[in-house]
Amino acid sequence: MEKAETPLQKVQANIVKACKIAHREPSEVTLIAVSKTHPAEAIEPLLREGQRHFGENRVQEAQGKWPALREAHPSVQLHLIGQLQSNKAEDAVALFDVIHSLDRPSLVKALAKAMDKLGKRVPCFVQVDVGEEDQKGGCPVAELPALLEQAQGADIPVAGLMCIPPFDIEPAPFFAFLDKLARDHGLDGRSMGMSGDYETAIRLGATHVRVGTALFGERGKPA
């Protein structure tokens, strides 16, 4: 009797299928397991299965659980996927390997200062407000060229663009728009797609998908 697939195996299989449809290689897509609000005990099974990219929303929460996990699994890559306050920039640069939520000039300044101080350059995705929703953060589309220029001038490695489409609206047009923006600006990375739509995102060019519920189940409440 065959062993049932784990949630990680199911998501990985779906990524392979989506890549096949898009004539892409699965190696072009990085799966980020969104472990926000989940305790170390829920993360360890995925680590044992070989998952190495994880996403957190809050600097403080990540500081509480990841140092010990990373000591046991030094190859882990930690991604900050939530909005970042400028006063937390130094903590974020110290802890994370990639930041997905660079979205305003003040944060460029704070991150550049922190990277200079710590002697560490952390790749950043510029979050774009594709749905014109202020509450989600993100750089307005019209301001994107200036923000990219500022980030590059501050020696911040720009990995690509990130978006969170509006809820309850077909996400494909927003993914296609982010893909076009990335191409227009000569950027390779597209951080887009979550549990409900990552396959669509992959078909439209996603290089990083942020999947939580499909791997961990429904989120608990933060401590």
Image (cartoon, grey):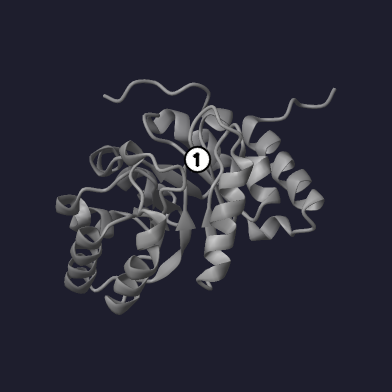
* Residue at the spot of label 1: 165
Which amino acid type corresponds to the residue marked 1 in the rendered image? Pro
In-image side of 203 versus 136 (left or right): right
As drawn, the residue found furthest toward the front would be 142
Front-most of residues 167 and 1: 167
Residue 97 appears at what percent x and percent y? 38, 59
Q: Quadrant of residue 29?
A: bottom right
Instruction: Sort mark 1 into few (<14), some (14-19) or many (20+) by Cα contacts within 10 Å.
Output: many
Task: Report whether residue 188 is seen.
Answer: no
In-image side of 148 versus 180 (left or right): left
Q: Quadrant of the N terminus?
A: top right
Residue in the picture at 58% in, 61% down? 180
Q: Quadrant of residue 3?
A: top right
Q: Secondary structure at mark 1?
A: loop
Residue 151 appears at what percent x and percent y? 32, 70
Count the numbered circles shown.
1
- Vertical placement of 130 versus 90: above or below? above
Residue in the picture at 53% in, 48% down? 192
- Vertical placement of 212 versus 31: above or below? above
Front-most of residues 138 and 30: 138
Residue in the picture at 41% in, 51% down? 79
Residue 169 appears at what percent x and percent y? 56, 31
Residue in the picture at 25% in, 59% down? 94
